[in-house]
Amino acid sequence: MAKSPETEHPNKAFGWAAKDKSGLLSPFHFSRRDNGDNDVTVKILYCGVCHTDLHTIKNDWGFSYYPVVPGHEIVGIATKVGKNVTKFREGDRVGVGVITGSCQSCESCDQDLENYCPQMSFTYNSIGSDGTKTYGGYSESIVVDQRFVLQFPEGLPSDSGAPLLCAGITVYSPMKYYGMTEPGKHLGVAGLGGLGHVAVKIGKAFGLKVTVISSSPNKEDEAINRLGADSFLVSSDPQKMKAAIGTMDYIIDTVSAVHALFPLLGLLKVNGKLVTLGLPEKPLELPIFPLVLGRKMVGGSDIGGMKETQEMLEFCGKHNITADIELIKMDEINTAMERLAKADVRYRFVIDVANSLSPP
């Protein structure tokens, strides 16, 4: 007979979980494994709220495995380290991102691309290396193999730095891989949400000219004056879109709703690159003519490996890049999810776990 979440492991734990596809989160008692020889136990201070959390608690993608304790943008303090752990000491400030396990022996893992390992384990709603279910950062603590723990750079704030563990690496990795970092080149950022606003900041740090592409005209002032974009393009304005045809070297498409790719491809120069990061619930139509006639490329990317994620954190620390956040208490999470579904957040919710999570 399968053990209950509360008795599956030796150490009692507490968090908030969704129990069904209503997505309603409520207090949840479960358990964590003992700290192994290669593990780091982390007391969670802050956890960002990602759009993936919302999709998962509502089973939008069809593979949610209830109960779900979401959260994969975790910053905390190492409270225990195993005897084989060399990179971390008790008291270190650390981060845990989207993944907490992989086979550590395949070609992807050997190339520090654990995020593409066929046996990769997500931080929540997944099966860990020990064969038990993973629970995320909407909780008081987590136990993670040292390979999947990150040093949090000195000077990078814990609260506004937390979303970088997903949003930051999700935009940083494709920019590096696809060569979208040459100073002076023109980057378009489609969608100004949790991913998009970080893409603007990272793009500017690379020395790019950055244009925000958005269907919301009221975001123009914020994009330019608050986030530092060079220009703003209203995607619903046919005249402005026509005037911008062939002006961009790269586009990062962060839009997670179903949308047309044809207008974005038109904005690219010859040899331009469009990288899609959003995960719409239905397939998008990919027009081939603009690709062939302009030697353009469409690609994708999914977070990044651990080495690159650490590199991204150091880069953001050096350039003072953080997410723009709204700090919430744990018991405000359901209201936050309702607002997130309406895109009513500038630009990322972060839960103050250490100061607001306590068993009932």
Image (cartoon, rainbow, N blue to C red):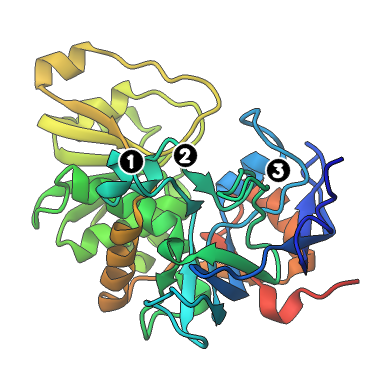
Instruction: Give the image quarter of residue 300.
Output: top left
C-alpha gap between disc 2 and disc 3: 22 Å
Structural crowding at the residue carrying mark 1, measured as other residues with C-alpha within 10 Å and reported as few (<14), some (14–19) or many (≥20): some
Q: Which residue is mark 3?
A: 57
Q: Which residue is mark 2?
A: 119
Left or right of 297? Residue 46 is right
Structural crowding at the residue carrying mark 3, measured as other residues with C-alpha within 10 Å and reported as few (<14), some (14–19) or many (≥20): many
Q: Amino acid at mark 2?
A: Gln
Q: Amino acid at mark 3?
A: Ile
Residue drawn at the location 29% of the way across and 58% of the way down? 308
C-alpha gap between disc 1 and disc 2: 9 Å
Q: Which residue is mark 1?
A: 106
- Going from N to C along the chain, the mark reached first, 1 or 3, is 3
Q: Amino acid at mark 1?
A: Cys
| Number of the front mark, 2 or 3 | 2
| Number of the front mark, 1 or 3 | 1
User: Where residue 264 sits in the image (x, y, percent)?
Assistant: 29, 30
Residue drawn at the location 76% of the way across and 73% of the way down? 357
Residue drawn at the location 51% of the way across and 32% of the way down? 257
Q: Residue furthest right?
A: 360
User: Where residue 193 sits in the image (x, y, percent)?
Assistant: 47, 51
Q: Is residue 145 above or below residue 18?
A: below
Q: Is residue 219 visible?
A: no
- Going from N to C along the chain, the mark reached first, 2 or 3, is 3
Residue drawn at the location 27% of the way across and 65% of the way down? 311
